[in-house]
Image (tube, grey):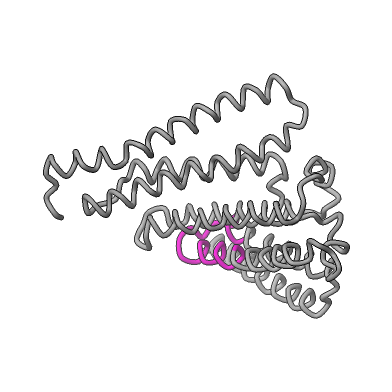
Amino acid sequence: MTKVVDDDRQQYAEKIKTYQEVIESIVHWEQEFLNTIQAEPADATLKRLNLVEQMLNLTSYYLIINEVSYSMLQFANKNALEDGRKSLSKGITYLQDMVTNYVDQPFSEYEDKVAPLEPVNPAERYRLIRKMGLTIQLLENAYGDNTKWKWFFVDLEGRFSAVTKNIFDMKNMIVNMDPRSPYYEPAVYHMRLIKKLLQKSADRFREKYELATKARQDFQMGINFLNALRRIHILLGDSYEAEQLKKKVDVWSAKMETDIKNRTEA
């Protein structure tokens, strides 16, 4: 490792000073904002979207500090990465509070929960989700492949997959996905992303089960994401894809039960 001299540390401290000030202002704003919501709960759901946005911004500043550390000191700033991981997780939690963390539940079970988001158009919903997805990817890249947090990101991305699905305007899906709709493109792109993320989370939870935990709940989460994807295809009228997913769920479920039985008998 390259030796870090005092001058390098001093230059680094000066370089990140502005970013640290912005971070402190966002952290202070967050607490003040939460106090405001508690005192004035009207339209709290819409207000919480600002919290999600600011947590993503906060994570970005932690990532910048880490990049500056790499550039000037030749090593990662582990504290900045840890703080970024916490702020990103908090941002997803704020979104979960609005749209639920449901994976394999019909829209009717969380429709009332997401109803206050109706004023938010499909383009804005998709923009926020894209920003969140990019922030997750940047943080995962910053940690690198050889990290103890590898399986943490499977869980984090699973949460992200769920909120990406749940924030989508299912109630007006047919209208918004009509080519004549002004929201046709963001609605279509958002739906494509939902399908991609649900499949990815299913595969990654299966991978986590096979390579790390052997825990039934991880395999079951993979199956839940497959079932959620099947629901989407049914809603879209994709009967062939829905049937293929049903077969895949049956195979995965049988594999899970066989594994559990074999371990019990061993």
At 72% across and 72% down in the image, what residue appears?
250
Relative to the observer, which residue lies in front, 217 or 237? 237
Relative to the observer, which residue lies in front, 106 or 59? 59
At 42% across and 40% down in the image, what residue appears?
83
Residue 213 is a magenta residue: yes
Part of the protein shown in magenta: 201-219
Task: Tell me where residue 53 appears, x and y as whole percent.
Answer: 59, 43
Relative to the observer, which residue lies in front, 97 or 147? 97
Residue 137 is a magenta residue: no
At 82% across and 56% down in the image, what residue appears?
170
Could you tell whether 77 is left or right of 140 in the image? left
Furthest residue in direction bottom, as rendered? 240
Secondary structure of the magenta portion, mostly? helix
Could you tell whether 90 is left or right of 186 in the image? left
Task: Tell me where residue 155 appears, x and y as whole percent.
Answer: 54, 53
Above or below for 105 versus 93 = below
Could you tell whether 240 is left or right of 198 in the image? right
Above or below for 48 versus 67 = above
Relative to the observer, which residue lies in front, 207 or 235? 235
